Image: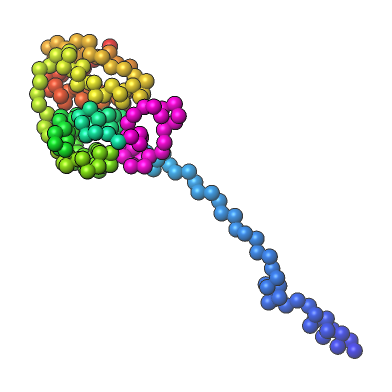
Amino acid sequence: MGTLAAAAGISGAPNLSSLLRHQIVKPVQVPPPRARSFHVRRLTAWRRASSSTPPPPPAAEAASPGLYSAKGYELTKENVNLVLDDVRPYLVADGGNVDVVSVEDGVISLQLQGACGSCPSSTTTMKMGIERVLKEKFGEAVKDIRQVEGIQIETTVEAVNNHLEILRPAIKNFGGSVEVVSVEAGDCSVRYTGPDSIGSGIKAAIKEKFPDIINIVFV
């Protein structure tokens, strides 16, 4: 009798297969991904700036035209400059810039300046960045985009100020300002306020356009 009871007790005990079938498996908690490093965020900054579907601007900036506007533009020199204002901060911060020389019959002629024009990767800068932005904004109206060499002009206060006109929107975005005070015997005095990185870009842009200017002093 005791043997039968013991056998009955054993047969009634749950076996390993039964336990596994009835075990409640808790979901595995996957930790959230770590935030991307600063370097990764910086590497994607240019791609975001030249993307055809950038995030919408804040309401306070909605009235400001530019690359982030959904409005289409007629292909003119003024509008090309307007679109390029959105990528100039990236170029200026690296000691370069881009000047729109002409827009005729769908052909856009550009001059890369400063570090952008002299570095070995200038062709990549033109193809992967500037050309992409312009073609996405103006579409089939753009027949060709050409990189041209600069044309030397007389070095005067007015000429240097006019040259800096294309930089002023980017400088203003950083809360700064720039104005040429004097140009004399290879020295150029500039009244500038703003980030040091943009200041270096201004100096490079002036020297690239006016090679007879040797010294640039911020006053």
From the top left corner, tell me how far across and down residue 173 is, in percent: 35, 24
Magenta-drawn segment: 43-71
Residue at 27% x, 13% y is 191
From the top left corner, tell me how far across and down residue 215 is, in percent: 18, 17
54 and 79: which is toward the camera: 79
On screen, residue 23 above or below 207: below
On screen, residue 18 above or below 4: above
Residue at 16% x, 41% y is 144
Q: Is residue 35 left or right of residue 205?
A: right
Q: Residue furthest right?
A: 1
Q: Specify the principal SS of the magenta part.
A: loop
Q: Is residue 56 left or right of residue 149?
A: right
* Residue 88 magenta: no
On screen, residue 84 above or below 10: above
Q: Can residue 43 be seen in this view?
A: no
Q: In which quarter of the image is the C terminus?
A: top left
172 and 196: which is toward the camera: 172
Q: Is residue 17 left or right of residue 112?
A: right
Residue at 49% x, 46% y is 34
For residue 79, what is the image quadrant? Answer: top left
